[in-house]
């Protein structure tokens, strides 16, 4: 599992950088200004899952469902967010991202944050 580097989007812009999805998943910073951008050039759809820790639920018998996002095949492009504190793992402090295929061949991801005004 790799921790994604958060790239700050400023008024001057950002040249986005993407990394290959890691075998075993990835992790990213959490916050109301954080989002993920996935790109898929594979000949098959890819499913990305964001883990919601069990501790996030205010009701012990009603867990949140981990959101799943399908990134379409060949020229798939998905932006997901915000990656709020709901996704914060109590041990690592990050959001855990997993993929339906390991390694997620031809799937890249970037983590972005809006610069505070």
Image (tube, rainbow, N blue to C red):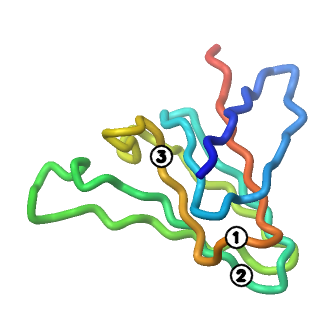
Whichever of callouts 2 and 3 sits on the residue coming sooner in the sequence is 2
The residue under the point 39% across, 41% down is 88
- Left or right position of 68 against 62: right
Nearer-N-terminus badge (1/2): 2
Q: Nearer the viewer, mark 1 or mark 2?
A: 1
- The relative height of residue 76 versus residue 20 in the rendered view (above or below) is below
Q: Are marks 1 and 3 in contact (CB under 8 Å)?
A: no
Instruction: Report crowding for label 1: few under 14, some 14 to 19, many 20 or more residues within 10 A (C-alpha).
Output: some
Q: Is residue 93 above or below residue 67?
A: above
Q: Which residue is mark 2?
A: 45
Q: Between marks 1 and 3, how big is the CA–CA gap? A: 19 Å
Residue identified by numbered label 3? 95
Check disc 1 and report the residue beneath it. 103
Q: Residue at x 87, y 20 (%)?
A: 12
Query: Element at badge 1?
Result: loop
- How many marks overall? 3
Q: Check disc 3 and report its element: helix, strand or loop.
A: strand
Toward which corner of the image does residue 67 lie, by quadrant? bottom left
Q: Residue at x 31, y 53 (%)?
A: 53
> Residue 28 at x, y = what percent?
57, 42
Left or right of residue 77, residue 70 in this image: left
In depth, the one of 34 and 55 nearer the eye is: 55
**Closer to the observer: label 2 or label 3?**
3
Alpha carbons under labels 1 and 2: distance apart: 14 Å
Q: Nearer the viewer, residue 101 or 30?
A: 101
Location of residue 34 by image quarter: top right
In the rendered view, would you say 81 is above or below 33? below
- Dividing the picture into quadrants, the one containing residue 24 is bottom right
């Amino acid at each position: 599992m790799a921790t994604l580097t958060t790239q700050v989007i400023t008024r001057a812009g950002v040249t986005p950088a993407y990394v290959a999805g890691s075998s075993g998943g990835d992790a990213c910073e959490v916050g109301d200004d954080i989002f993920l951008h996935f790109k898929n050039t594979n000949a098959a759809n890819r499913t990305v899952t964001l883990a919601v820790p069990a501790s996030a639920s205010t009701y012990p018998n009603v867990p949140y469902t981990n959101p799943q996002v399908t990134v379409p095949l060949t020229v798939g492009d998905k932006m997901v967010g915000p990656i709020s504190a709901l996704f914060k793992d109590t041990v690592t402090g990050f959001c855990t991202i997993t993929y339906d295929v390991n390694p997620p061949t031809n799937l890249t991801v970037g983590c972005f944050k809006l610069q505070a005004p």
